[in-house]
Image (cartoon, helix red, strand yellow):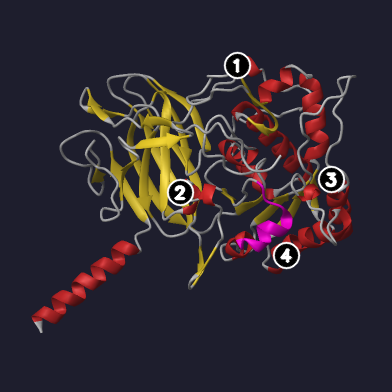
Amino acid sequence: MRKHITLLLVCCCTLLSAQTTSYKFDFSGKKKAKEGYILVTPETLYTPERGYGYDFVGQQSTVNGQQSTVNSAEHHNSEFIIHNSQYFSVDVPDGNYRVNVVVGNRRKAGVTTLRGESRRLFYERVATKKGEYKTCSFTINKRNTLIEGTEHVRIKDREKGKLNWDDKLTIEVNGPAPQIMEMTIERVDDVPTIFLCGNSTVVDQDNEPWASWGQMITRFFDENVCFANYAESGETAVTFIGAKRLKKLLTQVKPGDYIVVEFGHNDQKRKGVGDGAFYSFMYNMKIFVDEARRRGATPILVTPTQRRSFNAEGKITDTHLDYPEATRFLANREGVHLIDLHAMTRVLYEAMGPEASKGAFVHYPANTYPGQAKPLADNTHFNPYGAYQISKCIIEGMKKLDLDILKSLRADYVPYDPAHPDDRAAFQWDDSRFVEVLKPDGN
């Protein structure tokens, strides 16, 4: 009998552990953890058995033949100092999680950047004086590929290493002098979620120097909303649905959420029977609208971003055929919210001009990044600065729609005019450890 009771207790403990949705971690470097917290040391490395810890520590990663090592954490002055670009992972079920990170150090000043999953930006360069502590709060979405039973999202080979599609919630701590004292993670189900559907101009890009607006917009909102970015490079409206990305998304959506949809870049290349802006494209875009409304969510259509395509007069030439107009037509016909990013990015790039606009895209001389033997000159995909500007365009589009979620804009957000972009020279970005010199799918 005692044996059966012991076995039952073990099974119950295992089940509770598997369902844990809140954690408290102490990074202070002290010998004893704060009450109710788990003590984290440099030896607290992630393993599936432990379910949490520093990830990618000392791991050799090869990107285009270039090997790089993610440094380990170290103790310093009796508190925990993290060398830039450290990753801390925790196994949690799918859902939204409120993360509170206390940054600072009692002996040194610090400057800390916080990102999550696949380089989603939440806080940039938070400065703390010696002995000063600040709490950074945000809500982050975590998901894996499982839909139900044995059914999974059909992700691409290049996505299989993405931090967005696994069982772990991963927080990246970065910055010139990154320091944290504690971190709490707790499941939350009562915040509106903004689901993002789209292609390489929207996706969470994993590697430097690529970036998209979907991973920058998170920086401007507080912990009372959550963004879930389902976009992927190379996708069209129909392939997004065919890969079951939308089906997975719909298992998570609830009344009061938003589904934001931006396609057109890759759709215009489809030349099969029935393809076209006012044919299959509009049909498939309407599926997003109908599925959102069926579940009490608000659909928002976004026209595709312009490419960097200047004519001799220094004006942007349209390269998306009828796809922006088809998006506008569908939004008007169905009474759907529309953000005309196509129009705003025309203004943005022309304000920058033909030469300076290269600074918003992946244009870099050879050897700027490890393994980059040739220059990079991509006129579709943004670098972090460009993605940052586009995310502000999206927010201004939201403001025109007077969305409820705007009450969660952070106090430091400054109204933005694409005709007057931010100074490129003043923009600061803390590179992550991972670099990719091959361009994302799509163009």
Which one is in front, 195 or 148? Answer: 148
Residue assigned mark 3: 324
The residue beneath circle 2 is 98
**Residue 135, horizontal then vertical, whole percent:** 41, 35
> In this rendering, does residue 257 appear at all?
yes
Mark toward the start of the polypeptide (3 vs 4):
4
Of badges 3 and 1, nearer the viewer stands 3
The image quarter containing residue 278 is: bottom right
Mark closer to the observer (1, 2): 1
Cα distance between the residues tagged 4 and 1: 42 Å
The residue segment tinted magenta is: 234-244
> Residue beneath label 4, please?
293
User: Closer to us: mark 2 or mark 3?
Assistant: 3
Q: Kindly identify which residue carries mark 1.
A: 426
Q: CA distance from mark 2 to mark 3?
A: 36 Å
The amino acid beneath tag 1 is: Ala
User: Left or right of 43: which side holds 238?
Assistant: right
SS for tag 1? Answer: helix
Q: In whole angstroms, how far apart are the C-alphas of marks 1 and 2? A: 31 Å
Badge 1: residue crowd in 10 Å (few <14, some 14–19, many ≥20)? few
